[in-house]
Amino acid sequence: MDQKEFTFKGSVQNGFLMLFANIAITVLSIIGIVRGIILLDSTSGATGGWMLVSSIILLIISLIMWFGFLMLEPNEAKVTTWFGKYSGTFAQTGFFWINPFYGTKKVSLRARNLDAEPIKVNDKTGNPVMIGLVLVWKLKDTYKALFEVDSQTMASNPNTVGSDTKGLMNALENFVRVQSDAALRQVAGQYAYDDEDTKIGEPTLRSSANEVNEQLEQKLDERLALAGIEVVEARINYLAYAPEIAAVMLRRQQASAIITAREKIVEGAVSMVKMALDKLSNEAIVDLDDDKKAAMVSNLLVVLCGDDAAQPVVNTGTLNH
């Protein structure tokens, strides 16, 4: 989407210079009013009348000029309007004076955090999971933020939007929160929780965090661009099965882990038995027939694959001379 924001091009004066000038005008107008009242009671009544009127007008002008001062800190901006028409965004840091008839709304361009509470969604296989995210965002286009989303409706106190920066930014944060919820649901539905129910190598929420986070950032960028918001970073910070299936899934994971461990144990035990038989045969330590080899294999597998320590039994009467 095209950026609609542009820099304020109206007349901008040094704030301190205009401050001293306006103080001087205010003081002179007050002196003129007092002097005009005095002259009205003297023989120079006409002169006093003109001085009184001109001084009152000058005082009104000086009072209006007081509304043209603005001060901005780093990463703050003022969005200006001229009787309802957007006139640009003023983002210079310092103390300035502009035409007081410009309407201004102050916004913050600083980065903000959103730590979304975990929500329940269905993954690709239909399993309910709890998933949460942390999001870093900031304003990129002030025009879209103020004029293309209804910040008045979203604010908790609509009357503060425009006069209170916090009210406006909280309204935008509500927009970010809702869109983040929708984007998170969309992305989570594209992946399975883990690789138990997927093909080998297929990305999952647990095993492909980088890919999931990139997809999440892309979806958030698409949704938040409408409000002129830039996503600095988006990361999933919480992932777990929903409580109603957590116990079942834990047992399934435990069973899977046990099976995998048993496979490793059996694989290692078979390798060790083969090594033992080859060693006995190559070094001619003892000559075993097939029955004794089978008995030895059985005993070694029991010892190597058993969970408990083996209790040795010494047999001294099976070999005859």
Image (spheres, grey):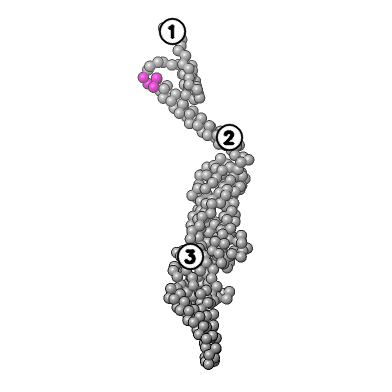
Inspect the magenta stretch and tell me whether residue 152 lies in it: no
Label 2, secondary structure: give it. helix
Residue 219 sits above or below residue 295 on the image: below
Can you give x and y, in whole percent of width and height, for residue 71 in the image? 47, 68
Q: Quick one: SS at disc 1?
A: loop
Tell me which segment is drawn in magenta: 279-283
**Mark whose residue sits in front, 3 or 1:** 3
Where residue 57 sits: x, y (%)?
54, 83
* Residue that mark 2 sits on: 251
Find residue 129 and report its image quarter: top right
Q: Which amino acid, mark 3?
A: Glu
**Measuring 55% from the left and 64% from the top, which residue is drawn there?**
164
Given the current orientation, which residue lies at the most extreme top position?
321
- Depicted 221 relative to depicted 252: above or below: below
Label 1: how many Cα within 10 Å (few below 14, some 14–19, many 20+):
few
Q: Main secondary structure of the magenta part?
A: helix
In this view, the residue farthest toward the front is 42
Residue 280 highlighted magenta (yes or no): yes
Real-space Cα separation, disc 3 to disc 1, in angstroms: 99 Å
Q: Select label 2 or label 3 by which is in front.
A: 3
Residue at point 48%, 17% (across, down): 311
Q: Pick the quarter of the image with the C terminus.
A: top left
Q: Name the residue that disc number 3 marks.
A: 76
The disc placed on residue 239 is none
Observer able to see residue 13: no
Choose between 92 and 1: the one closer to the eye. 92
Q: Report the residue marked by disc 1.
A: 320
| Residue 98 on image: x %, y % | 49, 75
> Which of the two labelled residues, at mark 3 and mark 1, occupies the earlier sequence position?
3
